[in-house]
Image (cartoon, rainbow, N blue to C red):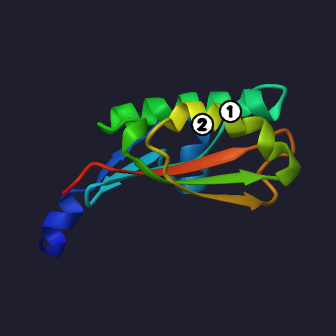
Amino acid sequence: MSDTAFKQAIRRISSGGAFEAKIGYCRVVVAGGFVHVAGTVGQGETVADQCQDALRIIHTALVQAGANWNDVVRVTYMLPDAAEFEACWPILSDTFGAHPPAATMIECGLIDPKYRIEIEVTAYLGA
């Protein structure tokens, strides 16, 4: 594939959120058979609530790109407190079921202290 053809094959899907324009990113970029979903936070009081909501937002983005949970090949979980991750395990296990992706969990600061988890995924649509 030529550079020109590859560049034409890139598709961006915006969520319409205010931070995309402020920060300069896109919720989803589809390129080279892959769907890259930006780090996503959710709303809620607990880490489990936020995890569930972030996954809801991610699922909507995947569907808009023509993918689903079974297509996810990589996931990164970012939490300010690694000890809270265990509360998310049942939700994540239910979400990915028999098709678990490669995964990484990172303990780090997030953009706002109210957020307990941020999730980023990559899915594969094929060539």
Is 79 or 43 nearer to us in this picture? 79
Q: Is residue 85 left or right of residue 10?
A: right
Disc 2 to disc 1, how far (Cα)? 5 Å
Query: What quarter of the picture does the N terminus occupy?
Result: bottom left
- Residue 16 seen in the current view: no
Residue at the limit of the structure toward the bottom, as seen here: 3
- In this view, the residue in front, 112 or 78, is 78
Whether residue 92 sits left or right of residue 84 in the image: it is left
The image's mark for residue 93 is 2
- What residue do we see at 26% from left, 61% from top? 32
Q: Write the residue at 73% across / 61% down.
A: 106
Image position of 2 (left or right of 84): left
Query: Which residue reaches farthest front?
Result: 98
Amino acid type of the residue that numbered disc 2 sits on in the rendered structure: Ser
Mark 1 lies on residue: 90
Q: Is residue 1 visible?
A: yes
The C terminus, quarter of image: bottom left
Q: Secondary structure at mark 2?
A: helix
| Coordinates of residue 47 in the picture (x, y in percent) | 79, 35
Q: How far across and down, in percent of the image, does residue 67 sit?
A: 33, 38
> Helix, strand or loop at disc 1?
helix
User: Dot 2, how many residues are within 10 Å of its Cα: few (below 14), some (14-19), or many (20+)?
Assistant: few
What residue appears at the point 49 percent right and 51 percent down from the top-left corner?
101
Residue 86: x and y, percent?
A: 79, 42
Q: Nearer the viewer, residue 93 or 30?
A: 93
Q: Amino acid at mark 1?
A: Pro
* Residue in the picture at 44% in, 43% down: 99
> Are discs 2 and 1 less than 8 Å apart at CB?
yes
